[in-house]
Image (spheres, helix red, strand yellow):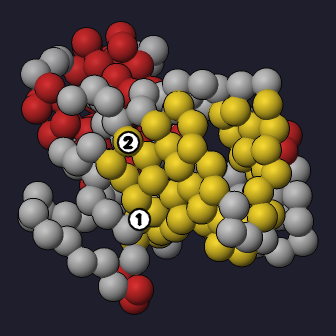
Amino acid sequence: MEFPKVEIGRRIRMLRREVGITSEELAKRAGVSQSMVSQIERGLVSPSLETLWNLANSLNVQIFAFFDQTDGERVNVYRRDDELVVKRIRPNSEYHLLSPSIGKDIGFFKLVVDPGEEVEDQVIQHKGEECGYILEGTLIVEVGPDRYTLTEGDAIFFDSELPHRFFNPGEKPAIAVWAMTANWR
């Protein structure tokens, strides 16, 4: 599947206009050039993970808002065969979006993390709170200076403003159900 840069650019432009800021202001907030924002919004370039993350935080939305496929309905049903799968947010990870994220206070998704080294996963932090429940495998979640090893049936809750990251030290994929809130509303 090809990276949907045109659709993501369109959504960034729409969200920027909803917030009521110029592309120059968004660029300043996100730490990129105005030219880069313009190219992203026109679908000319595929932004890096770091750029997408900075744009999402600058627009006060979850990064999933750039991939969401809902039309603002009050009720959304997500069928297994129609899942939106996002693979480029973090290395070795797939996010199966299970809820709308545009204009919502919570994002809900299935997280699948392939086995792999922790070196590639950068520490992230953002507004809101997160919680997860491990369905299969092992997931190590680092929050601040602490490290938590979670296995099937374990759950975690934490403030997303704390620096955090996760990785799978096992030999098979780790599967979790995850939710994130945003406290900017």
The answer to whether residue 168 is left or right of residue 2 is right
Place residue 99 in its image quadrant. Answer: bottom left
At horizontal 87% and vertical 50% (from top left) the residue drawn is 117
Would you place residue 96 above or below residue 42 in this image? below
At horizontal 9% and vertical 64% (from top left) the residue drawn is 73
How many other residues sit within 10 Å of disc 1, few (<14), some (14-19) or many (≥20)? many
**Amino acid beneath label 2:** Thr
Report helix, strand or loop for mark 1.
strand
In this orientation, does residue 66 appear?
no
The residues tagged by marks 2 and 1 sit, at their Cα atoms, a distance apart of 14 Å
Give the residue pinned by disc 2: 181
Nearer-N-terminus badge (2/1): 1
Q: Nearer the viewer, mark 2 or mark 1?
A: 2
Give the residue pinned by disc 1: 97
At horizontal 17% and vertical 18% (from top left) the residue drawn is 22
Of the pair 135 and 18, the residue shown nearer to us:
135
**Amino acid beneath label 1:** Leu
Q: Position of residue 137 (x, y in %)?
A: 78, 71
